[in-house]
Image (cartoon, grey):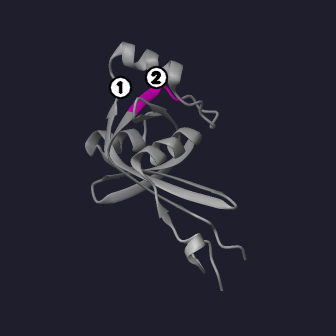
Amino acid sequence: MKDAFTNDSAETAPHNLSVEECWERLEQQTLGRLVTHAAHEIDIFPVNYAVDHRTLLVKTAPGTKLLELTIHPDVVFEIDHVTPPLAYSVVVKGTASELQRRDEIEEAERRGPLGLLPQPRYRWVRITPISLTGISFEPAVS
């Protein structure tokens, strides 16, 4: 049985994305997954995001995510995209910090993502990458 990660030839072999290609893919999407951890707990959250000067902006509300980012700012952020004949995945490892300065928050409001959830979100987090990795491949057809 074949799955999306099974390749039958060199033509469909995975291709490692360059840092530039990773940024291009990140700029094309608005929904990703943010992995946080604190007190031996690992959590993953779907989040809307925007790229801002080689960082990621996430708008959130007080709660588990923001608390964990405050306790332990090291995070992983990931996006995937599958539209045959192409698929890709980008992983960002970085440091998250809540925006505090009024000018940063105002700029984030202008540039940042619109939320999909109806509840209000008014706290901004910037993820500054330490590393970017990505892979592109042709998904197998079942």
70 left or right of 13 in image:
left
Q: Quadrant of the N terminus?
A: bottom right
Q: Is residue 11 magenta?
A: no
Instruction: Between residue 90 and residue 35, name the one nearer to us.
Output: 90
Residue 105 at x, y percent in the picture: 42, 19
Give the class, few, some or many, for how many residues have Cα within 10 Å of label 1's Cα (few <14, many ≥20): some
| Residue 134 versus residue 112 in the image, above or below | below
Mark sitting earlier along the chain (1/2) = 1
* Numbered disc 1: secondary structure: loop
For the point 46% across and 22% down, which residue is it?
Answer: 108
Give the main secondary structure, helix, strand or loop, of the magenta stretch. strand
| Residue 88 versus residue 115 in the image, above or below | below
Give the class, few, some or many, for how many residues have Cα within 10 Å of label 2's Cα (few <14, many ≥20): many
Magenta-tinted stretch: 121-125
| For the residues bearing labels 1 and 2, Cβ distance under 8 angstroms | yes
Instruction: Between residue 23 and residue 57, name the one nearer to us.
Output: 23
- Tally the numbered discs: 2
Instruction: Between residue 23 and residue 100, name the one nearer to us.
Output: 23
Q: CA gap, disc 1 to disc 2?
A: 9 Å
1 left or right of 75 in image:
right
Residue 62 at x, y percent in the picture: 43, 34
Query: From this viewpoint, which residue is outermost toward the front?
Result: 11
Instruction: Between residue 43 and residue 56, name the one nearer to us.
Output: 56
75 left or right of 14 in image:
left
Q: Which mark is residue 108?
A: 2
Q: Amino acid at mark 1?
A: Leu
For the point 64% across and 33% down, which residue is it?
Answer: 118
Q: Quadrant of the C terminus?
A: bottom right
For the point 38% across and 33% down, which residue is it?
Answer: 126
- Which residue lies under the disc numbered 1? 99
